[in-house]
Image (cartoon, helix red, strand yellow):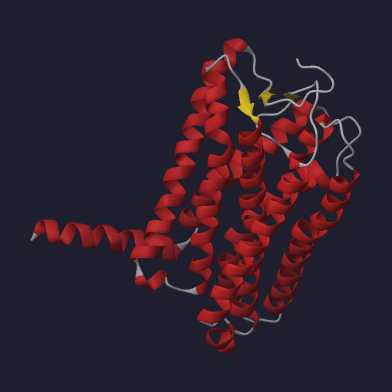
Amino acid sequence: MRGRNQTISEFLLLGLPIQPEQQSFFYALFLAMYLTTILGNLLIIILIRLDSHLHTPMYLFLSNLSFSDLCFSSVTVPKLLKNMQSQDPSISYAGCLAQMYFFLFFGDLESFLLVAMAYDRYVAICFPLHYGTIMSPSLCLCLVVLSWVLTMSHAMLHTLLTARLRFCADNMIPHFFCDLSALLKLACSDTRVNELVIFITGGLILVIPFLLIIMSYARIVSSILKVPSARGIRKAFSTCGSHLSVVSLFYGTIIGLYLCPSADNSTVKEAVMAGMYTVVTPMLNPFIYSLRNRDMKGALGRVICKKKIPSCL
């Protein structure tokens, strides 16, 4: 602990509420989940890069989403694993701000990419004859670049606003990463500007994208119901099923944690719910897109065949 008028130079991450006798089990569990996340998302990126059949707008967005998931998990999980094995859960002031920046950046990026993917499915199902014209390469590139620029700016804004705060005596963060809300609770200077910016940008970054996704799928469902063919209905729902699964996983936990908090929410419950969208969701995305997607299965088969044929010759 430091004096009240001194600024601290490091924080202590208290981590997840795990009993000492369960430490080894959860360490192995989180390590396995992290490796699965890395390998699964890398596989999707490599397949999309190697197979020309996947050079479409949908898979451009998917490759960016996989990269975002890979980085999003890497921002928090390696530090969590290190702290579970060491007796020193400290993180420097600069390291904490850097972790917060990249956490916001890649988390926001996933939100914007999910909107782009929803719009892509909306155009593909509601305007199939004009899909190639509407979803032109230039528009897709603009959507991806815009997503990166907006999320980079948003994360930088919160990081700079947090950097102006003073942190005095209490340096213990009841979390496994440097969460923005947890840092604001530790600040010993005025945080009203930070809270106002969070309220305003939270609607722009989280609520509006979520509403756009809901609107896109409402139009998709309305269009599907007009299709007389049962085969067409099954095909349309199959196309959108994987995307809806990702949206439900990602927004469900975030809305439950940040937009609908209960009065009895404890730091333990918040840490567990945060683990759902920082660890579990990035791990499940590759399974959702590969196991339920014929194009990804076909691409994997073609890539494997290309590797086998030269070796046979």
Above or below, 275 against 2 in this view is below
Residue 252 percent across, percent down from the top left: 73, 48
Q: Is residue 170 above or below residue 291?
A: above
Seen as rendered, the residue at the extreme front is 5
x and y percent of residue 33 in the render?
51, 35
Residue at position x 85%, y 57% in the image: 200
Image quadrant assignment for residue 244: bottom right
Is residue 313 among what the camera can see? yes
Near-viewer residue (203 or 119): 203
Q: Position of residue 227 (x, y in %)?
A: 66, 81
Q: Is residue 209 above or below residue 186?
A: below
Tell me which corner region of the image, top left, top right, bottom left or bottom right, holds residue 192.
top right
Quadrant holding the C terminus: bottom left
Residue plotted at (63% across, 69% down): 146
Q: Residue at x 59, y 36 (%)?
A: 76
Nearer to us in this view, 91 or 254: 91
Answer with left or right where residue 39 lies relative to residue 10. Answer: left
Q: Evaluate whether residue 245 shows in this view.
A: no
Q: Looking at the picture, how far across and down is residue 125, in whole percent?
A: 61, 78
Name the foreground residue: 149 vs 243. Answer: 149
Q: Nearer the viewer, residue 133 or 177?
A: 177
The image quarter in which residue 280 lies: top right
| Quadrant position of the N terminus in the picture | top right
